[in-house]
Image: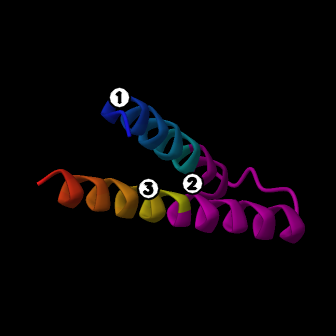
Amino acid sequence: MDIYWAEAVFRIIRERRQAITDLIVYGNVKSMEQYRELMGNFESLNHVEQELKGLLDKQERAND
């Protein structure tokens, strides 16, 4: 996997997670439904990040 591609994906994940955090922290959530959706998105971003890290670790070990 190209490291630049992975870095770009990590950046996008961080930016989206920060946007979700800002919405919640600054009280811009309009309903409990929106809050639940945001939290689901947040958890999904965490999951994708962990999976990507795992893939990069596997690739690194395979190249050693």
Find residue 34 and report its horizontal and vertical position in percent.
Answer: 84, 61
The tag earlier along the polypeptide, 3 or 1, is 1
Determine whether 8 is above or below 23 in the image. above
Mark 3 or 2: the one toward you: 3
Q: Secondary structure at mark 2?
A: helix
The residue that disc 3 covers is 52
Give neighbour class at mark 2: few <14, some 14-19, many 20+ (Cα, 10 Å).
some
Q: Are marks 1 and 2 in contact (CB under 8 Å)?
A: no
Q: Are marks 3 and 2 in contact (CB under 8 Å)?
A: no
Q: Magenta span has 37?
A: yes
Residue, x 65% and y 57% (percent of image)? 24
Which part of the image, by quadrant, shows the N terminus? top left
First to last magenta residue range: 19-47
* Front-most of residues 1 and 45: 1
Q: Which SS type dominates the magenta stretch?
A: helix
Q: Secondary structure at mark 1?
A: helix
The tag earlier along the polypeptide, 3 or 2, is 2
Find residue 12 and report its horizontal and vertical position in percent.
Answer: 52, 37
Asked whether, in this view, residue 14 is left or right of residue 30, the answer is left
Which amino acid type is shown beneath numbered disc 3?
A: Leu
Residue 21 is marked as 2
Residue, x 59% and y 43% (percent of image)? 19
Residue, x 51% and y 39% (percent of image)? 15
Toward the left, the furthest residue is 64
The tag earlier along the polypeptide, 1 or 2, is 1
